[in-house]
Amino acid sequence: MGDLDRNLMFRGVENCGITRLYDEDADQSNLQFRTDVIQGLSEIKNRKHLSSQYFYDDSGSRLYQKITQLQEYYPTRTETEILLKNSASIANQIMALMEKSSREEFKQVCVVELGAGDGHKTMILLHALLSISKHECEYIPVD
């Protein structure tokens, strides 16, 4: 993140609700894993494959986060810079749309992030939303 102070970035976000989704049926999850492995590795006509969702455990996720902080790994740094430059504008556009709407379901901000990782980039947008929003905010990270 360079010179950005992480504490500043996260200040104010503690008021944003975070919804965590869990797989409550481990047996079904294990069965799906077994099925995916058998199907992926039994391919005859196509290339054998496994879903990338099975590659990262907690230590793999921590390693990936360290990789994204390396100088050589530019995507995370570039995405962070884009969000820092544009988060206020994005938040203002979201709020403008909400204010125009008469529908009650548009009176709460809900940010769903697919591939959330540790969510640190999204915190930039959430901070911008919370700084101008009169509405509740819910963050749903899906990884």
Image (cartoon, rainbow, N blue to C red):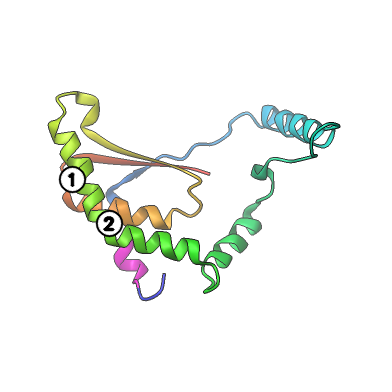
3D distance between C-alphas at marks 1 and 2: 16 Å
* Res 59 quadrant in image: bottom right
Q: Amino acid at mark 1?
A: Ser
Q: Is residue 67 left or right of residue 55?
A: left
Helix, strand or loop for disc 2: helix
Residue wearing tag 2: 86
Name the residue: 53% across, 44% down: 143
Answer with mark 1 or mark 2, whichever residue precedes in sequence. Answer: 2
The location of residue 14, given as percent across then percent down, is 31, 53
Question: Which residue range is magenta in the image?
Answer: 4-13
The location of residue 140, given as percent across then percent down, is 41, 40
Name the residue: 42% across, 58% down: 120
Q: Nearer the viewer, mark 1 or mark 2?
A: 2
Would residue 6 be seen by someone viewing this image from the given angle? yes
Name the residue: 36% across, 76% down: 3
Q: How many residues crowd mark 1 within 10 Å: few (<14), some (14–19), many (20+)? A: some
The location of residue 43, given as percent across then percent down, is 82, 32
* Res 12 quadrant in image: bottom left
The location of residue 117, given as percent across then percent down, is 51, 52
Residue wearing tag 1: 133
Please check the rendered image and state whether residue 61 is part of the magenta-colored stretch, yes or no.
Answer: no
Instruction: Tell me if residue 79 comes above or below residue 71 in the rendering.
Output: above
- Magenta stretch, main secondary structure, is helix
